[in-house]
Image (cartoon, rainbow, N blue to C red):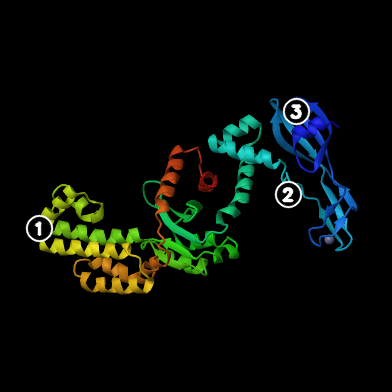
């Protein structure tokens, strides 16, 4: 037909044969430019057309009108491997009835608005919009996990009250959410994660977790090559918890004393250090325990191998147990994972930002009534 229409349409491998309008909608009949295809099974070139059964695909609207493309769907016969091969078009995914660019457009708009709203604008049903959203997401999903080596698993509370813990899985290096599971139970998490291809799971080298979830078993079963790394901030939190308990036990309740004791000493200014000294003068026990806490933190601050860290932590456990009873037994129970921190100094620090972002998306609501929709929505937000 006209060169101008091909130019405007801008789709590879096809040209416009005719363009008609029916009831305010625009129809383009397209034909393929190439007379044959390369067989994907044996790389043999074939022009032996077996059949052509065109399909109708929705494309982006123009001039306020919906656009439909009649797209050739050609099947060739490959004589060298004796198979029938359907031609693959770059702009249309297999079995889809909308062009890729149309689906991308819907996908992007849904994130700014709602499925219901975009459905009304495009004259599509909720299910059609949902189908597009799911399809685009599943295409992206592969890339979420691509080349992920360090993973963080954490649980966050989505709603107030019981039974609303959600497990979130993030790519530490990319700072991205890669999975969200509506449960904090081991079997559910394993079931959800094991769906990933084995090549993907086996490339994961480290998984960062806190000490409270049942994650070690999950990691063992899902990631065959991963080392468990206990997040240092959670370990520090456990140590600080014991210190704070001691503070109350010795009756020091001055305003601000908790903050001064639990903060990293190197983060305090000279005025605060002075006030801290005054606080510590009130209790010899607390002063000793405080120094132990800082010694513990310093182990984390120094650059050492796993082996040396193990020795340092063991020494600390020997003398600190008297004041840090609970945290010491926690540390003993997770000793290997805690020391694995020194392999690459991996932390879950990135999780905080991710969790906040998830909660923000949740608060915006968007009228999602079930978790699967919510999950897809959140993953989509992170994939941009
Ligand atoms: Zn072939």
Badge 1 element? helix
The residue sitting at 23% across, 68% down in the picture is: 325
Residue 180: percent from left, percent from top: 49, 53
Q: Earlier in the sequence, mark 2 or mark 1?
A: 2
- Residue tagged 1: 281
Quarter that holds the N terminus = top right
| Location of residue 324 with respect to 47 vertically, above or below | below
Q: Nearer the viewer, mark 2 or mark 1?
A: 1
Q: Is residue 171 left or right of residue 306?
A: right
Q: Does the numbered disc 3 mark a residue whose Cβ is under 8 Å from ligand 1?
A: no
The residue sitting at 48% across, 69% down in the picture is: 220
Q: Earlier in the sequence, mark 1 or mark 3?
A: 3
Badge 2 element? loop
Q: Is residue 378 left or right of residue 359?
A: right
* Residue toward you, 174 or 185: 174
Residue 273: percent from left, percent from top: 17, 52
Q: Is residue 367 left or right of residue 305?
A: right
The label shown at residue 94 is 2
Q: Is residue 157 left or right of residue 281?
A: right
Circles 2 and 3, Cβ within 8 Å, touching? The answer is: no
């Amino acid at each position: 037909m006209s060169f101008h229409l091909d130019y405007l349409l801008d789709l590879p491998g096809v040209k416009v044969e005719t363009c008609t309008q029916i009831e305010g909608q625009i129809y383009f009949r397209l034909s393929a430019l190439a007379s044959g295809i390369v067989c994907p099974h044996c790389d043999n070139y074939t022009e032996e057309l077996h059949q052509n059964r065109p399909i109708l695909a929705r494309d982006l609207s123009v001039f306020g009108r919906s656009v439909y493309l009649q797209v050739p769907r050609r099947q060739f016969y490959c004589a060298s491997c004796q198979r029938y091969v359907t031609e693959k078009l770059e702009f249309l995914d297999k079995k889809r009835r909308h062009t890729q660019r149309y689906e991308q457009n819907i996908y992007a708009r849904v994130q700014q608005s709602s499925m219901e709203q975009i459905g009304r604008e495009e004259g599509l049903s909720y299910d059609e919009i949902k189908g597009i959203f799911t399809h685009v997401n599943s295409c992206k999903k592969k890339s979420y996990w691509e080349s992920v080596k360090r993973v963080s698993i954490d649980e966050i509370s989505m709603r107030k009250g019981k039974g609303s813990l959600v497990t979130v899985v993030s790519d530490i290096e990319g700072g991205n959410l890669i999975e969200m599971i509506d449960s904090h139970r081991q079997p559910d998490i394993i079931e959800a994660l094991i769906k990933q291809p084995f090549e993907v799971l086996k490339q994961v080298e480290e998984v960062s977790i806190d000490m409270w979830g049942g994650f070690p078993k999950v990691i063992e079963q899902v990631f065959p090559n991963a080392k468990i790394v206990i997040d240092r901030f959670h370990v520090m939190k456990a140590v600080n918890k014991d210190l704070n308990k001691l503070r109350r036990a010795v009756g020091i309740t001055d305003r601000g004393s908790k903050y001064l004791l639990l903060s990293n000493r190197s983060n305090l200014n000279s005025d605060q250090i002075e006030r801290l000294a005054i606080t510590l003068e009130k209790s010899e026990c607390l002063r000793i325990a405080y120094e132990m806490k800082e010694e513990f933190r310093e182990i984390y601050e120094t650059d050492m191998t796993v082996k040396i860290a193990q020795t340092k932590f063991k020494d600390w456990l020997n003398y600190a147990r008297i004041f840090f009873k609970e945290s010491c037994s926690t540390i003993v129970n997770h000793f290997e994972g805690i020391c694995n921190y020194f392999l690459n100094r991996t932390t879950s620090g990135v999780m905080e930002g991710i969790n906040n972002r998830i909660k923000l998306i949740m608060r915006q609501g968007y009228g999602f009534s079930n978790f699967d929709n919510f999950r897809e929505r959140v993953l989509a937000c992170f994939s941009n």
